[in-house]
Amino acid sequence: MITINGISKTYQVAKRSSGIGQAFKSLFHREYTDVEALNDISFTVKPGEIVGYIGPNGAGKSTTIKVMSGILVPDSGSCTIMGYTPWKDRVAYVRNIGVVFGQRSQLWWDVPVIDSFELLRDIYKVPEQEYKANLALLTETLELQDIIGMPVRQLSLGQRMRCEIAASLLHSPSILFLDEPTIGLDAASKIAVRRFIRTINEEKGVTVILTTHDMNDIEALAQRIILIGKGKLLYDGSIDAIRNQFGTRKTIIALYRQQEAPLKIAGAVLESWSPERAVLSVDTEQVLISEVLISISQQVELIDIIIDTPPIEDMIIQLYKEHQI
């Protein structure tokens, strides 16, 4: 469905020192520096995939999304999506995609949300019956009943983002590009957005490209991660592969009846201890969890045991460090 081959994009950024003199000088002689946003990026995405496209600030994520959505033209390379070249076949192509930029709006600020929806219906030439069916589904699943008649400027950020996602799906796109869709949202709004993205992927087969700094979004939705850093593709694989690589260290929390002597477990590091609670760190490549649990049960009378895996954020940070970004 999506094939990107050798995409590169460089920006020229004006530079000058501070001060009035330098500002005046720049009117007549301006110096530029080249910023390489994308450097030979290549990957493919199959129909129905949810792909997390991640990386630190300035890595090139939004530039890639803009190239794939036809907003930017790359300096070199090719991009074919559903048989279209996005920046060449834009009118025909955009009928097949939905795009949500967390910091940009496609809704009109001073008019009710429903008026923006109806204008988008006319822009995309959505048949009336299809529009009504999509609007009913989106209104119900994204819980827009109470806000669809309100001007956009009166909505909270969470409410507006739900409306933005609905607006991007009114014309039944096959691909949805989401650039920071949950930025600034409260926990309840994030859960609602994640649930909806999962639903349209499973029920309608919509392919989703998701860029975000919230690794909980990635963990909840993505089956695959593409990591970009300094404009270069650094990793393309599954979350399970990252867990296998960086998630071998487990934290074991043992609760037991009062015990005066600290636990001594071969192959485990005792991070903290009290007469009724111990926290141990275990590298599962060095020792089996079962062996540690047996050793604990032989030394104390266990009440409860908790085995914790490092959060996905910690694993991604390790991945960043491995690639020095």
Image (cartoon, rainbow, N blue to C red):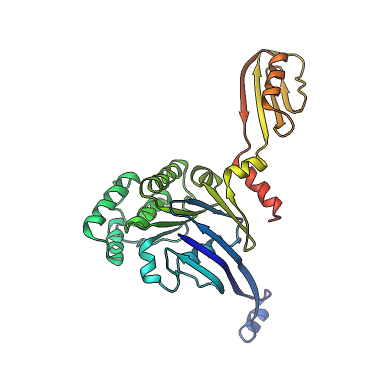
Viewer can see residue 183 = no
Q: Of 137 and 57, which appears nearest the observer? A: 137
| x and y, in percent, of residue 134 in the image | 29, 52
Viewer can see residue 25 = yes
| x and y, in percent, of residue 184 in the image | 49, 50
Question: Where, quadrant-wise, is the C terminus in this rendering?
Answer: bottom right
Q: Look at 63% across and 70% down and name the residue there.
A: 35
Q: Residue furthest left?
A: 129
Q: Look at 42% across and 56% down and name the residue there.
A: 176
| x and y, in percent, of residue 210 in the image | 49, 53
Left or right, 166 with respect to 229, comes to left
Residue 118 in which image quadrant? bottom left
Left or right, 113 with respect to 75, comes to left
The vertical placement of 324 against 279, above or below, is below
| x and y, in percent, of residue 115 in the image | 27, 60
The vertical placement of 141 against 181, above or below, is above
Q: How many numbered discs?
A: 0
Q: Look at 70% across and 51% down and name the residue there.
A: 321
Question: Where, quadrant-wise, is the N terminus in this rendering?
Answer: bottom left
Q: Of 310 and 84, which appears nearest the observer? A: 84
